[in-house]
Structures are given as structure tokens and as C-alpha cells.
């Protein structure tokens, strides 16, 4: 009679131990993101919002992951401190403007140097902005390049002719997380002749790719920004879900956003209209809950990739655009080859979505 009881205890203990070993990678990435942009130089604590930083040859290197770089300084020094930043992924056609200090051209397009002096004991914030003011603008979006240099070059050469403010990659810009592919991804803004911002995809995270490369080179997997009155929210859905922490973050950011066009960018889409690959969110309930929250906060468009095809459909009032047509194993059932999208936003708050077809893969 004791055997079943002992068996029940053993099974229960095993279940508890197994559940304790389970982790939520999205939660871990979200928590770790809080410290990716911190560094101390000459007794000055420096926090770069949403961007990784490193001290290299006496210069503080940072890669911008949004149009405006926000930096806070806390000095524990008894004298003024001169700091020099080397900022990459910046505009190629004009120098950014800084709220303090001096910006000069760097060694190549898209790289600038920012010299700033921090007073003794000062606690200050500063910004370096690629764009100022409002008005019309345009940006490009595509997903799933999968380290295909020929396809990336084809898209970049086309994008150069379109006077885009920036380009957004909705994940899987590499195929395997290693130094060669990540360094290639870092240089993409040189091909596109302008800033390239990235959402985190599942291929970026293979074999601890987040900890080994992404966190150090690209920084956070969740961030937002406002560009000329419109709101951009980039989220980590690489695990075919949205964690509780990311859901709350999105809800908070959307709640604080303005009244302009509201857009979300992620790798895995909440829904797959065709259903042929079943590569949307794992839970349809979660997808519906997430889009209901987005609907309540006035989201206009969700851009995603992961499914290597093009889809453009509405879920209630939210337009869902899947643009995973960057050349990573294009699907044949939709007849779409290499394609990227351009969103044209006008000064009155309206927009048009254009697709650019570059032929078969």
C-alpha cells in the first residue's frame, strides 16, 4: 500500500524540479536588456538608452538602435571630464544634432564622433538626434535576409534611390549566430546608406546567440521611439509568443504614446492569414489578447516577418503586414520573390504602403 504513495511523491518531486528548470527566454532577455547600455569612464556613470556601449581605444562606442540616442551622465569626479563617443548606424547624408557637445564626421559614412564635457559632480541628460522637426517621411521594412549578401545588396541598392529616412529589419537578418554573420549585420547600414534598425528573430538567438552576440552588438530586443509624430514599437516575439513582461511593456509604451500613426514591429506575427506554415504565435488566445490590447491603444499597423512570404490583411481595425520576403527561402505558393515595403507618411498623419518587387529569388 505504501508503493503508490512513494511513487506519487517521486513523480510530484520530479515535476517540481522539472518546472524549476524551465525558463522564459523572453523574460530573461527583457530583464538583461536593462543593463546593456551602462558603462563607467573616468568616474562618470554613463547610461545609453536601448544601445550597447563599450570603451575602445579611449572612445566610447555605441550603435544607435533608434533615430535619437538618449544618454544620461552621473559624474563622481571633482573636475570636468572630457568624453569622446564614436557613434555608428547614423545618417549618411547629414550630421546629427546634439543637445550638448560637438558632433563631427567620423572615419566613414554613418559614423560620427561626439565630444562632450561633463562638469564636476554633474547629473545630466543629453541627446544626439538624426532627425528634427516633423513633416513627411518614409522608411523601408523587410524581414528574413538570412545572411544572403546578394539579396541584401539588391534591396539596399533599390532603397538608396528612394530617399528613405531609415530601414527596419523584422528579424532573421542572419542565419547562424557567429562572428562573421553578426559583423556582416553590423555593416548593413553601409549598404543601405542610412540607419538600419532591427527586431530580434529566432535565428539571431540560436545557440545562445543573444548572450554571445546580440546583446553586446545590438542591445535591447524591445524598444520604442517617436519619429516626426508617429510611434514605433519594436518587440521580441522570436519565441512565437509575447511574455507577460513584454506585454506589459507594450501596453505601457502604447499608453504613453501620442496620437499619430502607431506601428509595431516584431519577427513572429500574431496571426498567419494563410495558415500554411503555422508559424504565428503558438497560442491563438494570446495572439487575440495581444491584438485586442493593441486595438484598445489605437495601433494602426503590425509589421512582421518569419513567414517567408507576403501577406497584407486586417484583424479588426489593425492592418497586419507580413514582409518576410528578404530572400531567406521564399515560399512558392504566393508567387512573390524578393520584395520590401515602403511606408510613406505625410505631414497630415495619413500614410500609403508601397511594395517594391525586385524579381524572383
Image (tube, rainbow, N blue to C red):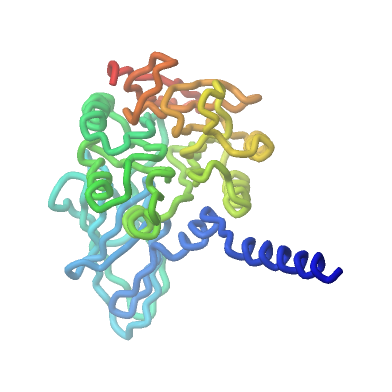
Left or right of 114? Residue 20 is right
Q: Residue furthest top?
A: 335
Residues 350 and 213: in front is 213
Quadrant (top left/top right/bottom left/bottom right) for the N terminus: bottom right
Q: Is residue 153 left or right of residue 267?
A: left
Identify the residue at image location x=58%, y=46%.
242
The percent position of residue 105, horizontal first and vertical second, equals: 17, 51
Identify which residue, 153 or 55, lies in the foreground: 153
Quarter containing the C terminus: top left
Residue 5 percent across, percent down from the top left? 81, 68
Please report the residue visible at 37 percent of the width from the left and 37 percent of the height from the top.
Answer: 169
Q: Is residue 235 visible?
A: no
* Quarter of the rendering containing residue 285: top right
Q: Position of residue 50 (x, y in %)?
A: 42, 56
- Closer to us: 337 or 95: 337
The vertical placement of 321 against 285, above or below, is above
Query: Who's the residue at 39% across and 17% down the image?
Result: 332
Q: Nearer the viewer, residue 214 or 129?
A: 214
The residue at the point 57 percent across, 43 percent down is: 241
User: As drawn, is 51 to the left or to the right of 95?
Assistant: right
Rendered view: 211 above or below 226: below
Amino acid at each position: 500500500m505504501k508503493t503508490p504513495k512513494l511513487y506519487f511523491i517521486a513523480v510530484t518531486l520530479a515535476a517540481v524540479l522539472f518546472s524549476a528548470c524551465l525558463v522564459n527566454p523572453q523574460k530573461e532577455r527583457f530583464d538583461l536588456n536593462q543593463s546593456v547600455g551602462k558603462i563607467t569612464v573616468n568616474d562618470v556613470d554613463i547610461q545609453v538608452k536601448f544601445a550597447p556601449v563599450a570603451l575602445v581605444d579611449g572612445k566610447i562606442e555605441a550603435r544607435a538602435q533608434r533615430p535619437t540616442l538618449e544618454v544620461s551622465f552621473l559624474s563622481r569626479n571633482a573636475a570636468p571630464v572630457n568624453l569622446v563617443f564614436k557613434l555608428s548606424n547614423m545618417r549618411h547624408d547629414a550630421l546629427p544634432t546634439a543637445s550638448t557637445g560637438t558632433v563631427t564626421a567620423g572615419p566613414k559614412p554613418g559614423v560620427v564622433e561626439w565630444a562632450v564635457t561633463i562638469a564636476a559632480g554633474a547629473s545630466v541628460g543629453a541627446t544626439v538626434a538624426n532627425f528634427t522637426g516633423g513633416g513627411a517621411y518614409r522608411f523601408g521594412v523587410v524581414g528574413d535576409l538570412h545572411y544572403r549578401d546578394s539579396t541584401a545588396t539588391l534591396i539596399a541598392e533599390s532603397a538608396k534611390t528612394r530617399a528613405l529616412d531609415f530601414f527596419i529589419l523584422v528579424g532573421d537578418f542572419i542565419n547562424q549566430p557567429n562572428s562573421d554573420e553578426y559583423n556582416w549585420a553590423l555593416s548593413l547600414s553601409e549598404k543601405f546608406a542610412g540607419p538600419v534598425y532591427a527586431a530580434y528573430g529566432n535565428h539571431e538567438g540560436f545557440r545562445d546567440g543573444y548572450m554571445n552576440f546580440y546583446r553586446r552588438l545590438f542591445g535591447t530586443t524591445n524598444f520604442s521611439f517617436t519619429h516626426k509624430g508617429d510611434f514605433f514599437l519594436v518587440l521580441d516575439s522570436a519565441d512565437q509568443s509575447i511574455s507577460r513582461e513584454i506585454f506589459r511593456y507594450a501596453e505601457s509604451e502604447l499608453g504613453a504614446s501620442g496620437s499619430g500613426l502607431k506601428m509595431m514591429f516584431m519577427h513572429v506575427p500574431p496571426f498567419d492569414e494563410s495558415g500554411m506554415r503555422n508559424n504565428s504565435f503558438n497560442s491563438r488566445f494570446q495572439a487575440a489578447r495581444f491584438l485586442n490590447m493593441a486595438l484598445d491603444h489605437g495601433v494602426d499597423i503590425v509589421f512582421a516577418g518569419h513567414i517567408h512570404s507576403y501577406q497584407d490583411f486586417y484583424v479588426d481595425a489593425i492592418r497586419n503586414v507580413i514582409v518576410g520576403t528578404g530572400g531567406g527561402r521564399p515560399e512558392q505558393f504566393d508567387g512573390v520573390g524578393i520584395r520590401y515595403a515602403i511606408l510613406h507618411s505625410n505631414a497630415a498623419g495619413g500614410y500609403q504602403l508601397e511594395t517594391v518587387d525586385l524579381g524572383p529569388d
